[in-house]
C-alpha cells in the first residue's frame, strides 16, 4: 500500500562523477539540458559516488538478506490474506461492488494515517515502527481467520477488518522502504531494489497459489498462513542493525504540523518525483484489474478458487521474470522516457486481458502487464530515494504510499464501481485505454521527468 552507505562485504574505490551537478538555483524547465534533474539552492555538490556492486555481492550481505527476507515474508502474508479476503467477500455477496468497497476500506486509513506514519518513521527507529505495524497485521489476519472459522456469511465484518489492516499497513511501508536505501551504496540502489522487488513478486506468486489451495481445505487456512508469515518477518526485522533503522530527526524535538507536511512540500517541489508518483497513481487507478479477478475466475473464465489463485499469481510471474532481468542488467539510459513507454504497455496488456476468454491468454496478459508495471515501480522506487534527503525519506515514503495505495486500494474501488455500472469487461477495457492516454499526457506535462537519462545524474534535492 526511502545517505548512509554501507558497502556489503568490502568497500570499493569511489569514482569521481564525470558530470557533477552545478550548485545554484534550478534552471527553468524550458532551459534544462536534456535528461538532467535540477539541483536546488543549498544542495551539497556530490562529486563522487561508490562503484556499483554486483548482485552476488549484495546477496552476500547479511543486512540486505535480512531486509529481503522481511519483504518476502510480509508480501507472502499480505498476498495470501488479500486473495482469501477478495474470494470470500465476493462469495458472500456475489456483487463486484463489494470488492471495490474492500479496497476503499483499506485505502481510507492508509491515507488518513500517512502523515503521522511518515513522521514516526523519521523520528523513531524504523525497525520498531515497522514491527508494530506488522504485529497489528498479524492480529487482523487472526481475526479474519476467526470470522471465517465461525462460518460468518455477513460482509460488514470484512469491511471493518480490511479497514484495520489498512491502518496497520500505513506504518509498514514508510518504515521499511527507506531501509534498503540506507543499507547499500547509492550507485547500487537500482540493483538492490530490483532484487527486493523480485522477492516481493515471488511472494505474490506463491501467496495466492497457497491461498487458493488452503481455501479448498478450509476457510481459515489462508489467514493463518498470512499471520504466521508476517510474524516471522517481525523476527527478521528485529535482527537488522540499529544503525540502519535509526531516525534522522531528533526524537526529543517537539513535533510540529509543518514537520509532518515536509514530505508533501518536497514532492510538490520536485517535479520529476511528482510526475513519477502521480503517473503511477492515475495510470493504475484506471487500469487496475486485480480487484476484479474473482469475477473473472467465477463468472467469465469459470476456473474456480484454484484458478483464481493462479490468476492472482500470474502478474507476479511476469514481475519476477522482469525483476531478475533488471537485477542482472539494470537500466542504464533513458530512464524517464522508458517510464512512460512501460505505462503505455501496461494499458495495452490490460485491454488484452479484458477481451480474453481464454484462461491461458488471460494469465499471459496478466504476466505481461505486471512485467511492464515492474519496470515502472523499479524506476519510481529508485528515483524517490535518490532525489530525497535521508532525513525526509520516511515522510516522503508515506506520501508516496498514499499515491500507491490510491492506485491499488482506491483503484480497486474505482474498478468495482465501474464494473457495477457498465459491466466487468467494459470497465477493464476502458481502464486500459485510459492508462495509455495518461502516459502520453504525463510525458507532455512533466518534461523534467522525461529528460532523466541516467540514475547517476540524479541527486538529492532540498526544500
Image: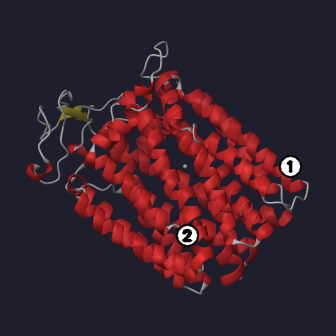
The residue identified by callout 2 is 289
Bin the neighbour count of mark 2 within 10 Å (Cα to Cα): few under 14, some 14-19, many 20 and up.
Answer: many
Mark yes or no: residue 8 visible.
Answer: no
Q: Nearer the viewer, residue 191 or 221?
A: 221
Q: CA distance from mark 2 to mark 1?
A: 29 Å
Residue 249 shown left or right of residue 164 in the figure: left
Residue 88 coordinates in the image, percent (x, y): 77, 64
Mark yes or no: residue 89 visible.
Answer: yes
Residue 453 coordinates in the image, percent (x, y): 21, 54
Residue 320 shown left or right of residue 192 in the figure: right
Residue 280 coordinates in the image, percent (x, y): 41, 57
Residue 309 image-quadrant placement: bottom right
Identified at 44% across, 40% down, the residue is 397
Above-or-below relation of 153 to 106:
below
The residue identified by callout 1 is 146
Upstream in sequence: badge 2 or badge 1: 1
Callout 1 secondary element: helix
Above-or-below relation of 436 to 71:
below
Q: Nearer the viewer, residue 392 or 359?
A: 392
Callout 2 secondary element: loop
Q: Nearer the viewer, residue 385 or 411?
A: 411
Residue 155 coordinates in the image, percent (x, y): 78, 60
Residue 127's disc number: none
Bin the neighbour count of mark 1 within 10 Å (Cα to Cα): few under 14, some 14-19, many 20 and up.
Answer: some
Identified at 75% across, 63% down, the residue is 89
Identified at 70% across, 37% down, the residue is 136
Q: Indicate the quadrant containing the C terminus: top left, top right, bottom left or bottom right.
A: top left
Amino acid at each position: 500500500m526511502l545517505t548512509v552507505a554501507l558497502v556489503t562485504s568490502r568497500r570499493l574505490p569511489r569514482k569521481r562523477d564525470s558530470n557533477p551537478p552545478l550548485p545554484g538555483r534550478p534552471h527553468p524547465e524550458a532551459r534544462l539540458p536534456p535528461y538532467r534533474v535540477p539541483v536546488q539552492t543549498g544542495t551539497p555538490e556530490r562529486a563522487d559516488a561508490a562503484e556499483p556492486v554486483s548482485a552476488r555481492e549484495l546477496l552476500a550481505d547479511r543486512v540486505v538478506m535480512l531486509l529481503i527476507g522481511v519483504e518476502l515474508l510480509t508480501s507472502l502474508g499480505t498476498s495470501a490474506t488479500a486473495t482469501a479476503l477478495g474470494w470470500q467477500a465476493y462469495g458472500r455477496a456475489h456483487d463486484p461492488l463489494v470488492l471495490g468497497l474492500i479496497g476503499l476500506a483499506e485505502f481510507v486509513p492508509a491515507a488518513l494515517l500517512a502523515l503521522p506514519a511518515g513522521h514516526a518513521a523519521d523520528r523513531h527507529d524504523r525497525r520498531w515502527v515497522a514491527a508494530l505495524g506488522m504485529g497489528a497485521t498479524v492480529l487482523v489476519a487472526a481475526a479474519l481467520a476467526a470470522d471465517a472459522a465461525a462460518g460468518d456469511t455477513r460482509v460488514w465484518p470484512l469491511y471493518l477488518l480490511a479497514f484495520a489492516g489498512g491502518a496497520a499497513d500505513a506504518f509498514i511501508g514508510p518504515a521499511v522502504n527507506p531501509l534498503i536505501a540506507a543499507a547499500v551504496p547509492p550507485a547500487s540502489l537500482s540493483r538492490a531494489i530490483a532484487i527486493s522487488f523480485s522477492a516481493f513478486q515471488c511472494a505474490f506468486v506463491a501467496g495466492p497459489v497457497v491461498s487458493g489451495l488452503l481455501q479448498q481445505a478450509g476457510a481459515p487456512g489462508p489467514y493463518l498462513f498470512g499471520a504466521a508469515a508476517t510474524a516471522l518477518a517481525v523476527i527478521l526485522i528485529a535482527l537488522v542493525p540499529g544503525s540502519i533503522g535509526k531516525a534522522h530527526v531528533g526524537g526529543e524535538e517537539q513535533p510540529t504540523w509543518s514537520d509532518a507536511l515536509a514530505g508533501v512540500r518536497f514532492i510538490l517541489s520536485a517535479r520529476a518525483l511528482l510526475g513519477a508518483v502521480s503517473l503511477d497513481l492515475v495510470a493504475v487507478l484506471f487500469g487496475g484489474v486485480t480487484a476484479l479477478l474473482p469475477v473473472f475466475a467465477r463468472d467469465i473464465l469459470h476456473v474456480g478458487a484454484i484458478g483464481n489463485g493462479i490468476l492472482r499469481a500470474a502478474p507476479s510471474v511476469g514481475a519476477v521474470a522482469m525483476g531478475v532481468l533488471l537485477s542482472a542488467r539494470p537500466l542504464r539510459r533513458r530512464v524517464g522516457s522508458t517510464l512512460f513507454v512501460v505505462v503505455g504497455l501496461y494499458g495495452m496488456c490490460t485491454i488484452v486481458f479484458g477481451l480474453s476468454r481464454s484462461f491461458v491468454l488471460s494469465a499471459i496478459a496478466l504476466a505481461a502487464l505486471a512485467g511492464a508495471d515492474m519496470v515502472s515501480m523499479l524506476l519510481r522506487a529508485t528515483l524517490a530515494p535518490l532525489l530525497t534527503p535521508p532525513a525526509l525519506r520516511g515522510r516522503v515514503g508515506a506520501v508516496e504510499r498514499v499515491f500507491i495505495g490510491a492506485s491499488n486500494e482506491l483503484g480497486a474501488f474505482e474498478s468495482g464501481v465501474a464494473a457495477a455500472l457498465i459491466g466487468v469487461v467494459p470497465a477493464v477495457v476502458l481502464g486500459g485505454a485510459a492508462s495509455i492516454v495518461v502516459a502520453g499526457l504525463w510525458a507532455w506535462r512533466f518534461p523534467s521527468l522525461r529528460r532523466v537519462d541516467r540514475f547517476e545524474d540524479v541527486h538529492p534535492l532540498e526544500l
